Image (tube, helix red, strand yellow):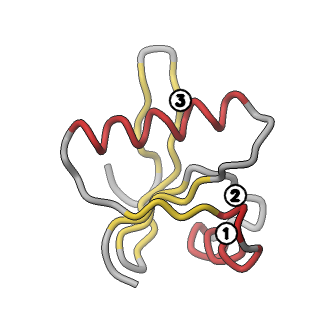
Amino acid sequence: MSGLRVYSTSVTGSREIKSQQSEVTRILDGKRIQYQLVDISQDNALRDEMRALAGNPKATPPQIVNGDQYCGVWAWGGDGGSVVGGYQ
């Protein structure tokens, strides 16, 4: 696969995950960065793919990947968030 992908889920009870996903897409949209939103709740294989790319069997969304290069996980802070991982 090529291009920027944001692994997310449309089914979660976690307010934190929902907020982080919204913030990632808001920033990417605001900067007019094209990306593919991958909903891991649609297929367990997508969840497994996300976790394999992240190198963490317990990784949760949102996770950001560019091509086959893992970029990081969205880390939420009181003053905003940042990508933590491969690059920023």
Q: Which residue is mark 2?
A: 59
Left or right of 62 on screen, residue 69: left
Q: Quadrant of residue 87?
A: bottom left
Instruction: Give the CA separation, mark 1 to mark 2.
Output: 5 Å
Name the secondary structure under disc 2. loop
Image height of 40 relative to 28, above or below: below
Left or right of 26 on screen, residue 6: right
Disc 2 residue type (three-letter): Ala
Q: Earlier in the sequence, mark 3 or mark 2?
A: 2
Disc 1 residue type (three-letter): Arg
**Are discs 1 and 3 less than 8 Å apart at CB?**
no
Q: Which residue is mark 1?
A: 51
Quarter of the image where the N terminus is located: bottom left
Image height of 49 relative to 78, above or below: below
**Are discs 1 and 2 less than 8 Å apart at CB?**
yes
Q: Which residue is mark 3?
A: 76
Name the secondary structure under disc 1. helix
Image spot of residue 21 (x, y percent):
53, 41
Instruction: Give the CA separation, mark 3 to mark 2.
Output: 15 Å
Image spot of residue 24 (x, y percent):
42, 41
Disc 3 residue type (three-letter): Trp
As drawn, which residue projects farthest toward the left? 32
Left or right of 51 on screen, residue 22: left
**Are discs 3 and 2 less than 8 Å apart at CB?**
no
